[in-house]
Amino acid sequence: MAQSSTGTPPVLLIAERRPTVAAGLKVFLADIPHAQAVAIMTGFDHVVDYAERHQIKFIIVGQGMDWATPLSEFRRLRRRNPSWRLVLLVDDADRDTIKAALAEGASGIIPASIEQHELVGAITRILAGSIYIPSTKAPLAQQHRASPSRVDATAPHPSLTPRQLEVLRVLAQGNSNKQIAQILEISVSTVSMHLNSAFHALGVHDRTSAALAYNNMGYPDYEYARFGQEIRG
């Protein structure tokens, strides 16, 4: 999705009421080739009207629209036009918000603290059709309060083998089983076997939860996860 079907550069609509945040995003996004950022700092109806009149397909939903929470505005926009590609800008990218946004059909979740080069890379990948989520690091106190069924991913899981960890790492980068097999030079059936065992060890049942669990294990070579459509599961 580098360009629209008409050959014109895609317009990135910034639905953010806070002027400083919106202006900063517009400056940061100016570095994305073949795209144009437009800051809209008013309410829901204005954003919808602008997007429909200009046939905009990509909207960054920030905090402050109509003074509601970002996710509630996100849901309103999703109901208005399910074909819009929506990215949620959040002050705190906690795991619950990430999972809720993915369940609502988000194309990405962007923390407000993101660095410019990371933001440009994230939006570029989303424009190309990928899903982007940030890593999450739960505070220690929150980890102690977590329910037993939730994965404690603050350290490498003792039940995972090195090969399972390697498969999870490539999974969390947004790759399908076939792509994992090609990257690791193993068969697709072997990938499936390792993933099934890893899911069981982690106590998860889908690719999103497994990737989030790996994402939070704290490996130094892993900072941000890029999800393909198949990972939302």
Image (spheres, rainbow, N blue to C red):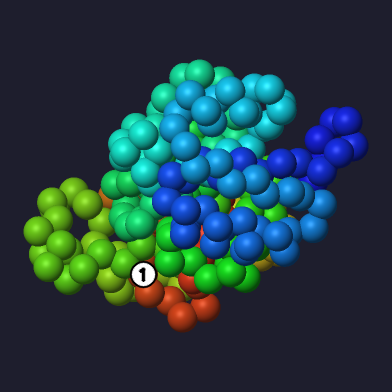
Depth order, front residue of 157/116: 116
**Residue 154, position in %: x, y?**
28, 70
Is 104 placed above or below 98 here? above
Residue type of the residue flagged with mark 1: Met
Q: Measuring 82% from the left and 43% from the top, which residue is drawn there?
A: 9
**Residue 116, position in %: x, y?**
58, 69
**Residue 232 visible from this viewpoint:** no
Depth order, front residue of 161/207: 207
Tell me which corner region of the image, top left, top right, bottom left or bottom right, holds residue 76.
top left
Depth order, front residue of 3/185: 3
- As helix, strand or loop, the secondary structure at mark 1 comes to loop
Residue at the left extreme?
145
Q: Measuring 90% from the left and 37% from the top, which residue is drawn there?
A: 7
Taking the image as shown, residue 217 lies to the left or right of residue 183, namely left
Residue at the right extreme?
7
**Residue 77, position in %: x, y?**
48, 27
Tell me which corner region of the image, top left, top right, bottom left or bottom right, holds residue 206.
top left
**Residue 51, position in %: x, y?**
63, 28
Is 55 placed above or below 143 here? above
Q: Measuring 66% from the left and 32% from the top, which residue is drawn there?
A: 57
Q: How many marks?
A: 1
Is 40 placed above or below 195 here? above
Name the residue that disc number 1 marks.
Answer: 217
Taking the image as shown, residue 146 lies to the left or right of residue 135, namely left
Q: Quadrant of the N terminus?
A: top right
Q: Measuring 82% from the left and 52% from the top, which residue is drawn there?
A: 34
